[in-house]
Every structure is written in C-alpha cells, then in structure tokens.
Image (spheres, coloured by chain):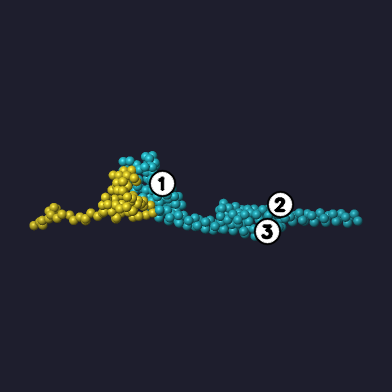
Chain colours: A yellow, B cyan
Amino acid sequence: MQEKTPPAWGTPPKTAPEQPEAAPADSAYTQWYEVKKGDTLWKIAKEVYGDGSLYPEIFKANQDTLSDPDKIQVGQMLRIP
Amino acid sequence: MKLKSVFAGFVSLAMAAVLLAGCANKMEPARNAIAGIEAAIAAAGPDAAQYIPDQLQAVSSQLADLKAKFDQKDYKGVLAAAPALLTQAQGLASAAGSAKQAAQAAALEALTGEWGALAADIPAQLAAVTSRVGILSKSKKLPAGLDAASFDAVTAGTTEATTLWEQATAAQAAGNMEQAVTVARQVKGNLDAAMAALGMSAG
C-alpha cells in the first residue's frame, strides 16, 4: 500500500516577514544633507539628482531614521546616496 | 788617472742600469695592482654608484691618487698603497648589495604603508561614487552644474576605477606591491576627479 503524500497546496509556505532594507554603512564619503525649512524628499532629490522622482533613493538610504518619506524634520541629517 | 775616471763612469752606468732595472721590475706589478683595483670597482657595478656613492667616491679618489703616483713613476708608492685600496674596492660590491637590500626593504615598507591607506579608503569612495553615478543615470535631468559630457566622463572614469581597483587588489594579493600601489593611485585619482565633478565632498 502506497503512502499518500500531502497535497502541495496543503500548507502555505512560511516566508519571513519583509524586512526594511538596511541603511548603508557610513564612511568618510557618505554624503549628508541637513533638512531646511520647506524641504521635502522630492525637493532634495530634485536638487541633488536633478529629478524629484528619485526621492525613494534618499528614503531607502535613511530607513534607520525615516519611517515615512513625508515626515522629515528641519535640522535632520539625511544620507544622500 | 784616466783609468780611474773610466772606472768611475762604468760604475755610474752600472748603478743607473741597476736603478732602471729596479724600476722596470716594479712598473708592471704596479700597473697590475691598479688594474686589479679598477676591476674590483667595476665589479661593484652601477649599484655602488646608486646605493653607496660616497664610499665609491672615496675609493675612486684614492685610485686617482695611485694613478698619479704611477704617472710619476713612484711604483714603490703604488705597490705600498695598493693592497689596502684593493681591499676597500673589493668591499664595494657587498656594501652596495647590503645597501640595495636595505633600500628595497625601506621602499617596500613605504609601499605597504601607502597601500594600507589606499585600501582603507578606496572601497568606500568607490561605493559612494558608484552609487551616485547609478542614481544619476536614472535621472531624467541632470542636476545643476553637471552637463551630459561631464557625466559621461565621470561614468567612464568610475567604470575604469572599478576595473583598476580589481587589478590593484589582484596585484597586491600576488605580492606585487609596487604595481598595486601604482594602480591604486590611479584609482584614487579617478575617484577624486569624479567626486569633484559630481559636487560630492570627502570627509
């Protein structure tokens, strides 16, 4: 008598919860930007990259201190990758 | 009386002949002694001039004195001074060898120190520049102060820096410190230029 194998769809695969990408290690060459009044990540990206739509690059590089790209504070130091 | 005078002349001639013969006997050994010293100096090769120039100069100067003595037919003087000078000349090769070895060890130490500084610095700089170039390459419009030609040059320089850095680390791993440092300096130059063009600051 053959043993029945459980159906493949029986148990949903266990996946690790998605982790936020780690911020890069800082070095002497890490570029920093101090947030000024009226700044947004879009505006900063526009200034340093010439294209505001690249703001997620700045957000990703600062996930250790930013939880929301719309919430930045005056005086905050942001990494500019 | 006449016989006495003839005899005196004969004696004088004989003495002169003996003296001349004595000189001739010493001339060839003196010449050989000088040749031996010259050969010993030549055997030390260009390393002596490069690594122990003062020592070489001292021996050469004494050799010149010896040659002057020879020209003045002071063969006895040449033969008296030659052995000590020959010893000094023969010592030049080993002294040059030791000095060369010490100089090479010092140069290697300096290169190793420079490599350490470059190897501690370049990876982070390369990562920072590569990251910025990658992001800017996705930009629809370049930032103020950076035109397309400059950006193309930076991109090419960064690509070259990446390749060169691989070559430098490979050379270092193979023990070729001189090549490793030479190439790493070029990488550093490329990256400094790229950072300046991109308006990035160091430190």
Give the position of the N terminus of chain B as an image quadrant: bottom right
Determine the chain carrying the residue at label 1: B
Pick whichever of labels 1 and 3 is earlier in the sequence: 3
Mark 3, other Cα within 10 Å: few <14 / some 14–19 / many ≥20: some
Q: Which residue is mark 1?
A: B196
Q: Nearer the viewer, mark 2 or mark 1?
A: 1
Pick whichever of labels 2 and 3 is earlier in the sequence: 2
- Check disc 3 and give the amino acid type: Ala
Residue A23, by quadrant, is: bottom left
- Check disc 2 and give the amino acid type: Asp
Q: Which residue is mark 2?
A: B71
Of residues B99 and B63, the one drawn nearer to the viewer in this rendering = B99
Pick whichever of labels 2 and 1 is earlier in the sequence: 2
- Check disc 1 and give the amino acid type: Ala
Q: Residue at x 79, y 54 (%)?
A: B16
* Spot occupied by residue A28 in the image (x, y as percentages of width and height): 39, 54
Q: Which residue is mark 3?
A: B81
Residue B145 visible somewhere in the drawing: yes
